[in-house]
Amino acid sequence: MENQYNFAFFDEGSKREIRRATLKAIAIPGYQVPFASREMPIARGWGTGGLQLTLSLVTKKDIIKVIDQGTDESVNAVSIKSLVRKTTGIKDTVDTSKASLIQSRHRIPEEELKKGQILVLQVPMPEPLRFVESSEYKTKRLHADGEYSGAWLVLFEKIVKFGMVTGGAAHPVFVHNRYVMTPSPIPKYDNSKLNESEALILLGAGREKKIYAVPPYTKVVSLAFEDYPFELEDQTGLKCNLCGAANVFLDEIKTEETDEVYYQCNDSSDCLKRLNKGGKS
């Protein structure tokens, strides 16, 4: 496939256009930059926005890691990784610390990202005001005016209805004290990893044709009321059944035979690394 396509699949003009949009997104943290989303050999809604960012930025020196909801081995992750590898010839890894470019669906790796790394997040719905305003023209005006009462209203309605802010993913955040942003459908547990991250975080929505970014060392705060503060998923007292880790994001797993419930690290490569270092077997 390397001989049939240009390096990283796209022609150089397409890469330049996406890079220009990416540079604007980095210059204005949290701002959604429109871009001419390209046709991809995968269906829209399966990570085309993130993949376009990855293919426009990857170099021959990069080492890539691709994860899907914490695992490196899902169909989505393996397919994207295969496409990038076959059209670039670069190496891939499951080790977060060894990757220079990480593309992820719905998770930020457990291992802390470092300076020089780029995290690309796939986004299905980038507009945090879409639940209260269907017009793209009007949401752009609301962002320009800094009018985010609609985002607060969504949180307030959840409190009135359920007594708490429900929803386990895509909790909106304030970026650089200016824009309200949807951080992709990452769990609330991952929101704090956006704040003052050493890595560059890019978010791409192929179907919605938007790119936005959180540059390194940018202040990111989850939306919350003073009397209803932002709360993470409650996993107090739980630990991974494989490596014994606590204070990580865990998946709840129920056995079909006995209905027994146990917990396991969502980030499979982080769990494996801990096991290889002598964790619980």
Image: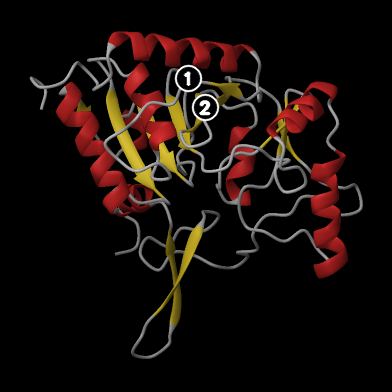
On screen, residue 155 versus residue 74, left or right, reads right
Find numbered disc 2 in the image and state the secondary structure of the residue it sits on.
strand
Tell which tag, 2 or 1, sits nearer the viewer.
2
Q: Quadrant of residue 58?
A: top left
Query: Mark 2 packing: few (<14 Cα in 10 Å), some, or many (20+)?
Result: many
On screen, residue 197 above or below 11:
below
Residue found farthest to the right? 227
Residue 63, position in %: x, y? 27, 25
Query: Mark 1 packing: few (<14 Cα in 10 Å), some, or many (20+)?
Result: few
Residue on which disc 1 sits: 115
Between residue 55 and residue 192, name the one nearer to us.
55
On screen, residue 157 versus residue 77, left or right, reads right
From this viewpoint, is residue 222 visible?
Answer: yes
Q: Amino acid at mark 2?
A: Ile
Residue 172, position in %: x, y? 70, 42
Residue 167, position in %: x, y? 67, 59
Q: Earlier in the sequence, mark 2 or mark 1?
A: 1
Residue 64, position in %: x, y? 29, 30
On screen, residue 172 above or below 196:
below
Q: Quadrant of residue 6?
A: top left
The label shown at residue 201 is: 2
